[in-house]
Amino acid sequence: MIIAIDGPAAAGKGTLARRLAAALGLPYLDTGLLYRAVARRVLDAGRNPADPQAAAEAARSLTQADLARGDLRGGAADKAASQVASIPAVRTALLEYQRKFGTENGAVLDGRDIGTIIFPNADVKLFVTASLDARALRRHHELSARGQGLTLHEVRAELAARDAADANRKAAPLIAAADATLFDTTEMSAEAAFTAALALVRAKNDV
Ligand code: DC
């Protein structure tokens, strides 16, 4: 079974995907980590994440160890990940890995283009979103808990910029698949989203 979960940053995709994977006994892939790891490699090499050649080379030479790094989230990596993700050759280089991951044993995958490009025939597709204000509050809360001193205003502006970049790029833009079920978590708890998503999966797949 393939479950595709797409949506903007900080909408609650990751939490939902992880919980569904655990409940259904499926492997989980956070595909954002792939783009983050590519970005990290480019930054570490002192190159520009907007340079298609530098980013494509990094994507083609990605290793499992790159994905396990502890510095893939926050700061420069967020913006650089969005930059490398807009480069078609990067997306092509990462496509096979994602398809192989999913088809080996089934999987829950979250990202931006899982239901549209990576697995257009996924068994279940969810598009998880929430208002910009709700997402900014959640992300700000997470960052504050980790001791990072960005203001709510800064977090909101950074999310808005990343939304715009992800949604307006030509290559695999962030968009809900026509057959995805929309989950707006603005006023929905993580628990309620999980319960509703699990019920949907069970109704569709008899599991
Ligand atoms: O989900 P995330 O915030 O960790 O993703 C990091 C960046 O990677 C984000 O700006 C969009 C991009 N991304 C993408 O283009 N396609 C995916 N399937 C997953 C992430």
Image: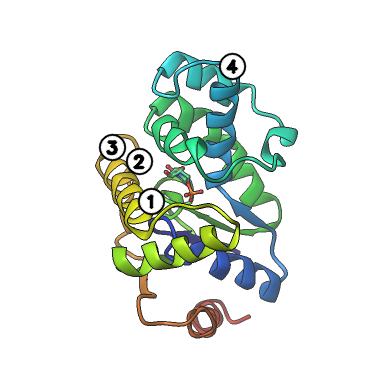
Q: Identify the residue under disc 1.
A: 116
Q: Which of labels 1 and 2 is toward the front?
A: 2
Residue at image coords 45%, 61%: 140
Badge 3 marks a residue whose secondary structure is loop
Which comes before the other along the chain, label 3 or label 4?
4
Q: Which of labels 3 and 1 is toward the front?
A: 3
Q: Is the residue marked 2 within 8 Å of ligand 1, measured from its CB?
A: yes
Q: Identify the residue under disc 3.
A: 169
Residue contact at pointers 2 and 3, CB within 8 angstroms: yes
Residue contact at pointers 1 and 2, CB within 8 angstroms: yes
Inter-mark Cα distance, 3 to 1: 15 Å
Type of residue at label 4?
A: Ala
Type of residue at label 3?
A: Arg
Inter-mark Cα distance, 2 to 3: 7 Å
Type of residue at label 2?
A: Ala
Q: Position of residue 13 (x, y in %)?
A: 49, 64
